[in-house]
Amino acid sequence: MSFAAATLAQEVHFITLDPGHFHAGLVQKFMYPQVDAVVRVYAPPGPDLQDHLRRIEGYNDRAVSPTHWKEIVYSGPDFFQQMLRQKSGNVVIIAGNNRRKTEYIDQSVKAGFNILADKPMAITPDDFTLLREDLSLAQQKKLLLCDIMTERYEITTILQRELARSPEVFGALTPGDPSHPSVVMESVHHFFKEVSGAPLIRPAWFFDVRQEGEAIPDVGTHLVDLVQWECFPDKALDWNKDIHTHSARRWPAQLTPQQFQRVTGLARYPDYLKADIAPDGRLNVYQNGTVNYNICGVEAKVTALWRFEAPPGGGDTHYSQLIGTRAILTIKQGEAEHYRPALYVEKNSGMNTDPQFESTLRAVIARLCGTWPGLEVKGSGGGYEIVVPDKYRVGHEAHFAQATEEYLRFLAKGKTPAWVVPNLLAKYYTTTEAWRLSHAIK
């Protein structure tokens, strides 16, 4: 996809649209040399907007590496129409209530804006249809429309991808079958957490899946993206031919009234959540889900889970397993790993007699040290752990800056790699098909 390049320093001007999610703030946790410090914000008045402005103010006021953003806010009821009319910037940042996100994208593309959006860009099949049209229109208008895929920047994920691209260690992906998929991705997120060192207060609408999206169409977007990015690197996928979803299901995470109050600050459920309240007063939030599908002849399974709060010392966790003909690559992030992602390599059962496996693995890791110096191979339970220096573990919040920097590089070049747009479509086709199957809609 090609679009008009932004090549001059300070030529990029951010607009923040309706920032209802803390991810909108994380895009601005750091400064970017090609982005003007003045950011126009268009949003309805209320706590979502105030939380966003406080977060940016905190970045400006911190002692270490303070930012110097200047937020100019329009908060009238016609905020969206004013943004479209005033055209006060050229890149719109969208991270908030997902019920209107596809509409925001649609109208912003039609008005001629580049867009960097938080996931998900689409939460239902109807949204996917509109997103397809918008991506086509963006290409015609030479606009850059991308989402923020932070998990691509986590070091163990990067190394899992690199090892999967090393046939002398990994071989090739086995096809698997629906009962025994060759690719498994699972994440566990938590409603109550800290962001930028402070307890996160979530808006009540976050617990309404009609506004936030359900498990697979929401956080499952990251996992589906990683399946594509790790297993089929640089390959442009065809959503209409390469993806075949088999089954999907959803089930609720439950919050007590006390937990709901703790994470939102509200003493009662709003009216729009009444249909989700169980007889015992707990709130059913359909943010647990799984989907089984075939991608380019390989069986995959993605699962997204939510719990209220992580165990002491823990946080959101990620599990990933790729089964190759020579090796199995697994990322774990449990108590045994002190809740930090760790990458393990073990021989596939058919390779147990290969005496050269360890030396081959060490040779590949030595090669990767050319890019990431300090990687090591350590024996672990009959297999191996890839030991990663702490300097590469920059943390989830820093990944937002890395994703934004890549977007800005695309913008400066005036084009994206050929696989970016096709794979974005394949991703949202998969997640919205999971929604359709889990709702048993034909």
Image: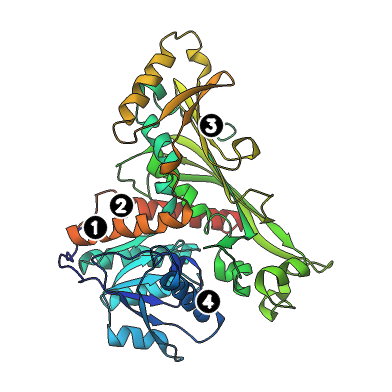
- Nearer to us: label 3 or label 2: 2
Q: Where is residue 63 in the image (x, y as percent from the top left)?
A: 44, 66
- Nearer to us: label 2 or label 1: 1
Rendered view: 78 above or below 27 = below
Disc 2 target residue: 420
Task: Tell me which label, 3 or 1, sits earlier in the chain.
Answer: 3
Instruction: Give the residue type that dot 1 points to.
Output: Phe
- The answer to whether the residue labelled 2 contacts the one labelled 1, judged by CB atoms less than 8 Å apart, is yes
Disc 1 target residue: 410
The image quarter in which residue 129 lies: bottom left
Q: Is residue 270 left or right of residue 29?
A: right
Rendered view: 24 above or below 220 = below
The image quarter in which residue 147 lies: bottom left
Q: Position of residue 18 (x, y in %)?
A: 45, 78
**Marks 3/2: CA–CA distance:** 28 Å
- Nearer to us: label 1 or label 4: 4
Disc 3 target residue: 177
* Circle number at residue 51: 4
